[in-house]
Amino acid sequence: MKIINYLKEILKKRFNRENFLAYIKIFGCQQNEADAEKICGFLKFLGFNFTDDILVADLILFETCAVRHTAEEKILAHIGNLKNIKKANNNIFIAICGCMVEQENIRNYIQEKFGFIDLICGAKIIENFPELFYEKLTGKKLNNFCNIHVSQVLQKNKFKAWVPIISGCNNFCSYCIVPYVRGPEKSKDYNQILDYCKKIIKNGSKIITLLGQNVNSYFYNNFNFSDLLKEIDNINGEFAIRFMTSHPKDFNKNLVDTLASLKHFSNHLHLPVQSGNNKILKFMNRKYTREEYIEKINYAREKIKNLVITSDIIVGFPGETNLEFEDTVSLIKKIQFASIFNFIYSPRVGTAAFNMQDNISHDEKVRRISKIIKIQEKISQEFLSGFVGTNLKVVIEENFANKSIARSKSNLIIELEEKFNVGDIISVKIISSKRNSLIGKKI
Ligand code: SAH
Ligand code: SF4
Ligand code: F3S
């Protein structure tokens, strides 16, 4: 506690006020959201509140992503824009965290080009953020600082909880930077996860999302992912269990049978297929075939009624011919996903695919992604229109003017023309459908 009080004194002097404001910007995936919630818990502990207005912040923190070049370019532009803010007030503290700054070349580039940054803390060492923060602010080294775990995770949304169960990735899909910036897989303590779930469910969390690059690899003291799911399902309370991401190679019948037996499963599966062509899947090092993927989906749909399945697609992987791309198109038509995230392949330094011959023009990649977007739009619309006339149980997520935005257990977005309390669970009748959402009325 002494050290925390000392740190607070330093902050008061530096920012010249009693209460401090932090501006947090998160890029990338849910892992970053979860990391940011831990850091926010620590900052709250130190007396920070949070603002959406960067111009009034004492501390500015970015959680960065490295998955595609476009993401990095965007983040670097945002970092460049901080220069004037720092020029106007040198006391403002700027921290750049997350996956992008795990890369040495980017770290060097940032240090050279943006010397005004106070702290760089990569994704692998995010647990050390408090120590690094202390050291930068006080100029002193620290041995036994209270670690980030003494402070609570600060959930952005009280009823929506991210629960990291496994960090890192061992899969090394040939295009992907994540195993390099997040390190090898490491499963978290089984009992700690359960205790944490019990606590947040008791405190009102309604949607529990178990996080990992491949949750199926979870393994701790002989407990696997199915064991964990069953145990969480036994907790008393009204909540839904989600998880992401599940790698299709490990998504097997046992897991489907477990999911079918759960009371709290959200009925939403995010199962990124990436490509519908076996040669490309092999070059991607995905370790499943198109046929295996289809079989797994069929089994899951047979066992679990009203399953909502979403996916990720990469177009323009090195060497992908038009015919191979058409296999992806036909797979999308065959599976009829509820929605997909589409990406143009982005070469990442250090990955296996970086050295593969990339001879597809940018225009052709854009043509391919546009084609998929158009086809999926139609499929998504048809999928959503199928809900008109049905009843759904939803949780209220946000309020706008005279509207509420809610989400179904299976992750569909429902707009309501009335205002309800955030976190309420209500039953609605679906009266119409739009492009990406449904319109509902309370019953
Ligand atoms: N662990 C998850 C995915 C994490 S990255 C999984 O295995 O599914 C999220 C998505 O980004 C991936 O599914 C992939 O579609 C996309 N992606 C990853 N690396 C990419 C790259 N180099 N270029 C384009 N898209 C990429
Ligand atoms: Fe990347 Fe593949 Fe790991 Fe997903 S499973 S994070 S795509 S390497
Ligand atoms: Fe990006 Fe890191 Fe997630 S690279 S997608 S934020 S794991």
Image (cartoon, rainbow, N blue to C red):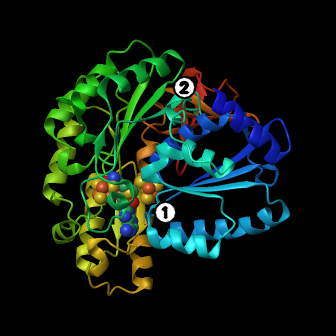
Q: Residues within 10 Å of mark 1 (few under 14, many from 20)?
A: many
Q: Nearer the viewer, residue 335 or 222?
A: 222
Which quadrant, please, contains the C terminus? top right
Q: Position of residue 376 (x, y in %)?
A: 41, 59
Which quadrant of the figure shows ligand 2?
Answer: bottom left
Q: Residues within 10 Å of mark 2 (few under 14, many from 20)?
A: many
Of the two numbered discs 2 and 1 in the rendering, the one whose residue sits closer to the viewer: 1
Left or right: residue 153 versus residue 223 is right
Residue found at x 29% / y 52%: 184
Q: Nearer the viewer, residue 82 or 404?
A: 82
Q: Is residue 321 above or below residue 25?
A: below
Which amino acid type is shown beneath numbered disc 2? Val
Residue found at x 24% / y 56%: 171
Res 144 visible: yes
Q: Position of residue 72 (x, y in %)?
A: 52, 68
User: Mark 2 or 1 closer to N-term?
Assistant: 1
Q: Residue tagged by mark 2?
A: 428
Q: Nearer the viewer, residue 359 or 427?
A: 359
Q: Position of residue 54 (x, y in %)?
A: 76, 53
Q: Is residue 436 above or below residue 257?
A: below
Q: Secondary structure at mark 2?
A: strand
Left or right: residue 72 versus residue 253 is right
Q: Residue tagged by mark 1?
A: 100
- Total residue callouts: 2
In which quarter of the view is residue 236 placed? top left
Which quadrant, please, contains the N terminus? top right
